[in-house]
Image (cartoon, grey):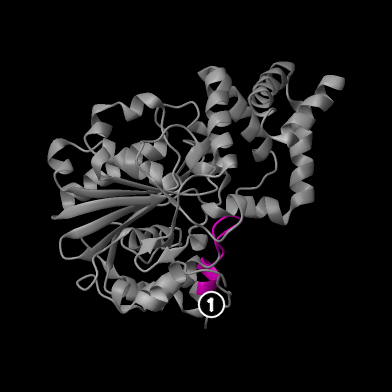
Amino acid sequence: MELEIEPYNKDYNILDYIALRGDVSFAQSPFNSVDALILSQLSYNNMEEIVPDDFNNKIKLSDVAHIFKNPKEILKRCNMGAFINPLTPRLLVNAGESERFGSINLCGFVNIIDEDKIEQFSAVTYELYKNQYLIVYRGTDDTVVAWYEDFNLGWMDEIPAQKDAALYAKKAFSTLKGSFSIAGHSKGGNLALKAGIALEKAERKRLQTIYNFDGPGFYPEVLKSDGYLKIQDRIRSYYPQFCVVGMMFEHGPAYQIVRSSAEGILQHDPFGWNISGSTFQTEASFDETSRFVYESFNSWTRRLSVAERKRFIDVFFSVIYASGAKTNYEIDQNRVICGGKMLAKMAELTDSERSDFMRAVKNLIDVAKDKLPMINVFNLLRNKK
């Protein structure tokens, strides 16, 4: 059974890369950042009960692809939710059937969804060839708890997924012999950096490259830490020209801006990133909206105390959880019912909760109103009341 999904019909993208260069081995053309992006995107696939959860047993990507083509497995594994590109399973199948990627071994698959801890964490390790490994952390998936944890980056020194990313890398380094690179897209890019920062001296000697694909950054003190400074020369960061996720918090000064055929916030999706040969097509600068997001978001977080940020996030997600949905897909499929439940929850907020929530919103308006007309209009309407 074939995956009945039409690919992007625009510029040269990661699917085209496999079609045109899939017969080129790593011996003929060394592993590169485009390869790392493809393997990062593959991590969004549901590999439960396929890829071993330990590092001693492995399965080839070609065998994973064969399993994914089974009709029953397609039905089980191909609903990517509301935000992950539905071409992702096809990317896995195409990569697994190519000479370049098919012989890669996979191991150490972990997938944690913990609503009590507010954590979404998933990782997989690829053995590219003998004694050469790539650890990949999955970015934000479709679950509500995943988005809750992302928002908690706004007030917590370390979210649970960051802690588990560091522990996962240490376990991989201690179990497997050889050299490592670490990668991830979106939140996965942030986790890759966090894991690299946490490495000890002996482990850093085995670290080659960290690939960060449009991941959110850190508070300034993290970029000044000893752990970060000792790995910064091995960090390769890539952001689309219209960048929202990657504009959150602070980043190091070295990065590349990738041209995308997608529009607006959809440029976060790697399937729209343009490729030329074995490299990304690049732009000279971010667009104006990206710079506005960076300035406004970081100014907003500085205006609020840690306690205010936490209260805002907790109230916001108490409203989301009132919908009864566990994923964004469920909310999207039941908009009327979920929306009604969320509005009812908003009406139940205490005066204190409502006051704290509106204070955070007011601060966002204050930092954004001069640069975003929609926010400015909302502010004028508010002042007329």
Residue for badge 1? 3
Q: Can residue 301 be seen by looking at this rendering?
A: yes
Vertical position of residue 85 compared to residue 285: above or below: below
Quarter holding residue 220? top left
Give coordinates of residue 306: x percent, y percent.
51, 19
User: Horizontal and vertical percent for residue 217?
Assistant: 42, 36
Q: Residue at x 36, y 36 (%)?
A: 252
Q: Is residue 177 left or right of residue 381?
A: left
Main secondary structure found in the magenta portion: loop
Magenta highlight on residue 311: no
Q: Which residue lies at the image location 24% right of the left edge and 41% below the top edge?
A: 233
In the image, 368 versus 75, the foreground residue is 368
Residue 330 in the image: state x and y as whole percent: 66, 53
The quarter of the image holding the C terminus is top right
Find out whether residue 77 is within the magenta segment. Answer: yes
Region in magenta: 74-85
* Coordinates of residue 181 in the picture (x, y in percent): 25, 52
